[in-house]
Image: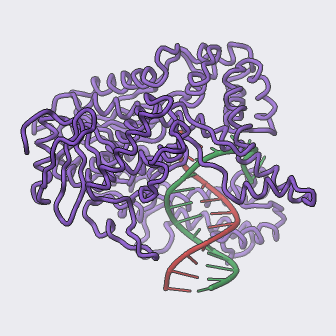
Chain colours: A purple, B red, C green
DNA sequence: TACTGGTGCGCG
DNA sequence: AAAGCGCGCACCAGTA
């Protein structure tokens, strides 16, 4: 490693078995290159991180970072070229003439396979093109230059710089979440299953309580052979006994009065638990006291994370009790109260809505303002406004909010109108919705032609409204996701600053990079779980709170609004 | 045997 | 049948 000025960025690329590291100065000019044998890569990166703390520029975070984490090495900052490309390619804050919009080799799907150097990187698809973004150093350098110039040339470079940094920090967090894992007590999980479903059957059949409720259903149907797991067959069985529902969904069934309803609802509940999070899930997804799902940053169009495998974002509340801190450790469980409405207030500059939210439950504030009568009404009305409800109680209440909070409601109404007209909308930091599909556009133009049928017009109108609800929600959901990324990134930095505990208090199952420090263990849109040594529990809880305040300032400056958290320190993630 | 689409339900 | 957004996953049925 050469001495010299500290590089601001180090671009990593893989070429024929070795790794090239290109050092760039603060103006992104090349200062030098190092060829690093694969065997020495981790050490080289750890040394460079300690010495320079550069921003690492690489093609795909999990492919570089999973291996480092496995050897106990963390990095503070990175620039994920694949994720940032996806943002810049569509962003209205980037000129259409920018080269990044045409570097299509970087339009790659998220990599679900988190292991580095696996054949996945070189897999061929049907057309015999390599899957995934380019991994070599020259391609990375060129794309990085395109991205930098796209950001800097735009009308609001600060926002895109923030967004790309936050997105990249999220990528680091996602890899770290997988490496550290969520502490999971398989015995507690098993106990919940046994209590709910009955003993685990030794020979493949259903557990006792599930079988019993199936029997009650079949008996109420008067058909000992009734099939309960096939929707069409179940529907026919219900019709035969006079339960004239159109679907077999819980909501519709609950409105019926018939002896089959109660056992059937119970059967559905139990069978859902067994098939989604039963013993098979436990043995597939929990190992060595940790649930290690794959988080997929940017996996949702709005910028929210998705997950792949294990249903990480759908863990039923019923099982939260199985989330257990290691001995001598604690969990800090925190979620944001009414994140999306608060974000809407801030991004629209609606001081009346911000005042309703400040220092209290936002829905209570709306009630106090007199716009609606009850908390429940406030909630339904606000959700309806953000989702585009037009009917029912929600649709009826929305106009009242429009009068009380014209700026906030104006923002989402404008977004809806733009979407219906075929336009694109953007989040606060500049993530832009995809343009309408060709089929959508074709349907709209067909409906305006002279020979258009009534059906053409109806369909075009329905699709337009569908898209309007999507863009309406996009601006809010997407900006909330940006706030959450800023929260995560800031929190991660604060936790890293807490001193490691001694070996005696370590939690070895969290892996070499996390066993002696508080670390993020779970993230779910507006909620985090931190796993922390007991002695740092209060500091970690404070860090969670401070990070939320910092995220609010980072996005919205001095706008007078707080992002209230519910923070608990406990041994389990169980709520209340 | 592998796929796709529909249904239903878990989460925010 | 949820009204009204965004997801992932299991299961079944129909098809290739």
Q: Position of residue A284 (x, y in %)?
A: 36, 64
In this image, A10 relative to A465: left or right? left
Q: How many marks?
A: 0
Residue at the image point whose x is 8% and y is 45% from the top: A1
In this image, A81 relative to A478: left or right? left
Does residue A565 sit above or below A100 in this rendering?
above
- Looking at the image, can residue A439 be seen? yes
Q: Position of residue A421 (x, y in %)?
A: 75, 43
Q: Nearer the viewer, residue A2 or A482?
A: A2
Q: Position of residue A422 (x, y in %)?
A: 71, 46
Does residue A325 sit above or below A537 in this rendering?
below
Q: Position of residue A20 (x, y in %)?
A: 18, 54
Residue at the image point whose x is 44% and y is 48% from the top: A100
Q: Nearer the viewer, residue A260 or C11?
A: C11
In this image, A205 relative to A494: left or right? right
Residue at the image point whose x is 43% and y is 39% from the top: A574
Q: Nearer the viewer, residue A208 or C8?
A: C8
Does residue A11 sit above or below A356 in this rendering?
below
């Amino acid at each position: 490693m050469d001495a010299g000025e500290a590089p601001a960025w180090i671009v990593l690329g893989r070429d024929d078995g070795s790794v090239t590291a290109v050092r760039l100065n603060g103006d992104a000019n090349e200062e030098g290159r190092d060829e690093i044998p694969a065997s020495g890569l981790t050490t080289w990166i750890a040394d460079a991180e300690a010495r320079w703390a550069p921003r690492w520029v690489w093609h795909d975070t999990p492919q570089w970072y999973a291996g480092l984490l496995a050897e106990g090495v963390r990095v503070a900052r990175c620039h994920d070229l694949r994720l940032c490309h996806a943002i810049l390619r569509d962003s209205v804050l980037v000129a259409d003439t920018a080269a990044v919009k045409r570097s299509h080799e970087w339009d790659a799907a998220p990599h679900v396979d988190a292991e580095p150097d696996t054949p996945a990187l070189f897999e061929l698809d049907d057309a015999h093109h390599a899957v995934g973004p380019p991994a070599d150093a020259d391609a990375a350098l060129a794309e990085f230059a395109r991205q930098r110039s796209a950001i800097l040339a735009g009308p609001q470079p600060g926002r895109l710089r923030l967004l790309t940094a936050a997105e990249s920090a999220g990528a680091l967090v996602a890899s770290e979440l997988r490496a550290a894992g969520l502490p999971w007590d398989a015995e507690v999980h098993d106990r919940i299953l046994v209590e709910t479903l009955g003993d685990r059957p030794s020979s493949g059949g259903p557990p006792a309580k599930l079988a019993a409720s199936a029997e009650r259903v079949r008996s109420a149907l008067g058909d000992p052979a009734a099939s309960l797991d096939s929707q069409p067959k179940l529907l026919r069985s219900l019709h035969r006994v006079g339960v004239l529902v159109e679907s077999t969904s819980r909501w519709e069934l609950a409105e019926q009065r018939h002896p089959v309803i109660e056992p059937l609802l119970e059967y559905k509940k139990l069978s859902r638990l067994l098939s989604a999070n039963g013993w098979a899930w436990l043995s597939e997804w929990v190992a060595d006291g940790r649930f290690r799902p794959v988080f997929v940053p940017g996996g949702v169009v709005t910028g929210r994370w998705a997950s792949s495998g294990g249903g990480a974002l759908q863990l039923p509340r019923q099982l939260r009790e199985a989330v257990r801190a290691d001995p001598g450790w604690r969990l800090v469980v925190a979620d944001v109260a009414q994140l999306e409405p608060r974000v809407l207030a801030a991004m629209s500059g609606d001081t009346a809505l911000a005042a309703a939210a400040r220092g209290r439950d936002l829905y209570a504030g709306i009630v106090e303002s007199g716009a609606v009568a009850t908390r429940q009404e406030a909630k339904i009305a606000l959700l309806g406004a953000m989702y585009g409800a037009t009917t029912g109680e929600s649709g009826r209440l929305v106009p009242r909010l429009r009068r009380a909070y014209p700026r906030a409601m104006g923002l989402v109404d404008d977004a809806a109108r733009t979407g219906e007209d075929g336009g694109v909308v953007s989040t606060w930091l500049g993530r832009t919705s995809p343009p309408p599909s060709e089929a959508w556009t074709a349907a709209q133009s067909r409906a305006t032609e002279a020979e258009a049928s009534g059906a053409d017009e109806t369909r075009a109108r329905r699709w337009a409204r569908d898209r309007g609800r999507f863009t309406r929600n996009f601006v809010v959901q997407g900006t909330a996701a940006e706030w959450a990324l800023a929260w995560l990134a800031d929190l991660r930095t604060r936790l890293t600053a807490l001193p490691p505990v001694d070996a005696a208090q370590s939690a070895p199952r969290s892996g070499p990079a996390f066993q002696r420090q508080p670390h993020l263990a779970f993230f779910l849109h507006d909620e985090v779980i931190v796993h922390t040594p007991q002695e740092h529990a209060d500091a970690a809880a404070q860090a969670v709170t401070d990070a939320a305040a910092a995220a609010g300032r980072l996005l919205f400056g001095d706008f007078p609004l707080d992002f209230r958290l519910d923070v608990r320190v406990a041994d389990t993630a169980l709520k209340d």
